[in-house]
Image (tube, grey):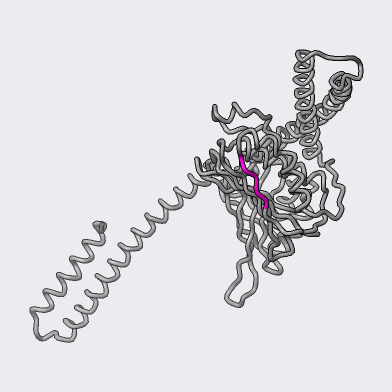
Amino acid sequence: MHSDNEISLRDKIIGLGERSAKKSYYPQLQEKLKYLEEKSIALLNILEDLEDSEKELRESEALLQIAGRTAKFGGFSADIGEQKITLSKQAALIFEMPENYSPLIDELIDCYDTKYQNIAKELFFNCGINGTPYDIEVELITKNGKKIWVRTTGEAVKNSKRNIVNVYGAFQDITEQKLAEQKLKKSYDELKELDRLKSEFTAIISHEIRTPITSIKGYTELLNDESMGKLNNNQKMCLNTILENVIRLGRLVSDVLDISRIERNTFTLNIQKVDVKDVLEHVLSELAPIALKKHIKLSLEIPNITIDADKDRLNQVFTNITENAIKFSPENEKVEITGKEGLNSDILISIKDNGIGISKNEFEKIFDRFYQIDSSNRRKKGGAGLGLPISKGIIKAHNGKIWVESELNQGSTFYISLPKK
């Protein structure tokens, strides 16, 4: 809107033009007055635009100050020649310095913790001399002795001759963020230590349990062989039940020890030349009685491929996955194992079943320790949820990969990729 003075001036110019226009004997004056009228109106429009722009600028500045207070963010400009820094209102609040105070560059850097002063000074002057921008986080002590964390950034400003004359930048108080990070790290370190102690405790207990298990198994087998006297059928049946459960418990203890070694990175391999086909044939012969009970056909199609690997550990992996395939397949089905040489000096083994399948959102979870898919049908199958995590650890130790492809009620295929050497 125009002020009263602007309206009065406009009316006087227009009125003067109209009065002069009535006097035809003043044509030159009339023309100049008209020109003056046009330029004056244009000037008034410019003044009005400037007034609107100034209002918008004040509003933007107010919004910026609000944003600065909310984000604890303030700017600065540094005069390289005078070695002085001009702080914005919010930046002065961060350092707890007086408003409109312009400290020397060294005075401001002296607020930094001593371990950051040299690097901060180097970065700042490198920016002022070579134009290299910087972005660092430093701990400092404000003028009132308060310890805070600040993120500071800076960029060089050049004049028309491309000479650096100023460094413009910002300070942001990140104390709350840093305290949260430190608290999170402390919690993580504590959890990591607890996990280490848990793995160590598990390993010790498992070793202690393994000794009596071995003793029980040995004496049970001795009794079952009737080396210490004849047994009736009921006694034999009881001993067979004891032996089966002792073997099962022994496998569980071995699995717990293996997962503990994997977690503590103490897992070792006995690398030798291994014919993968021989290992798979041995696995199928061992699992044939289990498959026969469910009338499941086991098939193997693989050429003789020799790789550098731990034979016993590969046997363990193939047994875990094939046994699962049998376990989760309905009766009168088949489990197919195939193998071939890859293009990148590796081999690819697949173990396919026609069982109940796995949903996509559990493809990664099944390789987590103790994880079992929440299904009453699966729970009936038993297991501690350690076979797949151990298999993954063994394959990873061989620099290989293991993954699954599956659909619910459509079966699953586990893939194992291993380098030859």
Percent coordinates x, y for residue 382 in the rendering: 64, 28
Which residue is painted at 73% across and 55% down in the image?
418
Percent coordinates x, y for residue 380 in the rendering: 59, 26
Q: 235 or 420, which lies in front?
A: 235
Which residue is painted at 61% across and 32% down in the image?
372
Percent coordinates x, y for residue 91 in the rendering: 60, 48
Magenta run includes residue 325: no
Which residue is painted at 16% across and 72% down in the image?
16
Q: 407 or 369, which lies in front?
A: 407
Magenta run includes residue 298: yes
Q: 217 or 298, which lies in front?
A: 298
Which quarter of the rendered picture does the N terminus lie within?
bottom left
Percent coordinates x, y for residue 181 in the rendering: 67, 39
Q: 226 or 61, which lies in front?
A: 226
Query: Would you say residue 183 is visible in this rendering?
Result: no
Q: Which residues are magenta?
A: 296-300
